[in-house]
Amino acid sequence: MSSEQNATHSLDPLVTDPGVYRVLLENDRVRVLEFLDAPGDTTNPHEHPDSVMITLSAYARRLSFEGREVDVELPAGETAWLPAQEHAGVNIGTTPTHAIFVELKEQAVRAPDPSVHPLGPAPRPLIGIPLSDASSDEEKAWGFA
């Protein structure tokens, strides 16, 4: 979906929070967004497709969806997988949040578990160690198992 087409979708972050999101690059496969806000700033409910998030500054946010909240703190220079999700957020840090989101336009290869609504970045699996059948339900819900 292009930004023009997405602009008609009310949960597109470019529509819900145009002052903090801007498009850096877009083609038929990805849309790259820059996000920049200040301590205490809030975002309206919006959604992201499956994305890769790169933090350019320390990232401290409280994300919420339908009464659930999760605090996310990441250092500058972190790269994280962000499964498709809807949320609102508030900068709970002491510095501006500056991040890049590489939104994928292709459909997910694996259908998400409809009973789990991800909130924030996915936990990182240990690199080089395969997950077994004994993986936790959370790991399976995030698609790591």
Image (cartoon, rainbow, N blue to C red):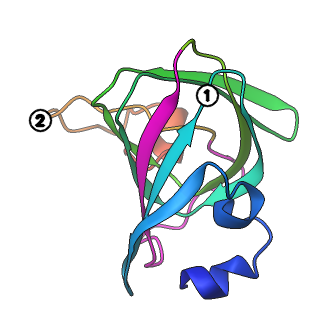
Q: In the rendering, which numbered label is found on residue 128?
A: 2
Badge 1 crowding class, 10 Å Cα cut-off, few under 14, some 14 to 19, many 20 or more, is some
Tell me how far mark 1 sits from mark 2, CA to CA.
37 Å
Identify whether 8 is placed above or below 35.
Answer: below
Image-quadrant location for residue 40: top right
User: At which x and y percent is residue 59?
Assistant: 48, 25
Q: Helix, strand, or loop for circle 2?
A: loop
Q: Is residue 18 left or right of residue 99?
A: right
Amino acid carrying label 2: it is Gly
Which residue position holds label 1? 38
What residue lies at 57% left-to-right and 12% top-to-bottom? 94
Check residue 110 in the rendering and tell me which mark sits there, or answer none: none
Which portion, as a residue range, is magenta?
95-118
Q: What's the residue at 23%, 28% (across, down)?
A: 126
Which label sits in the foreground, 1 or 2?
1
Q: Is residue 51 above or below residue 58?
A: below
The answer to which image quadrant residue 42 occupies is top right
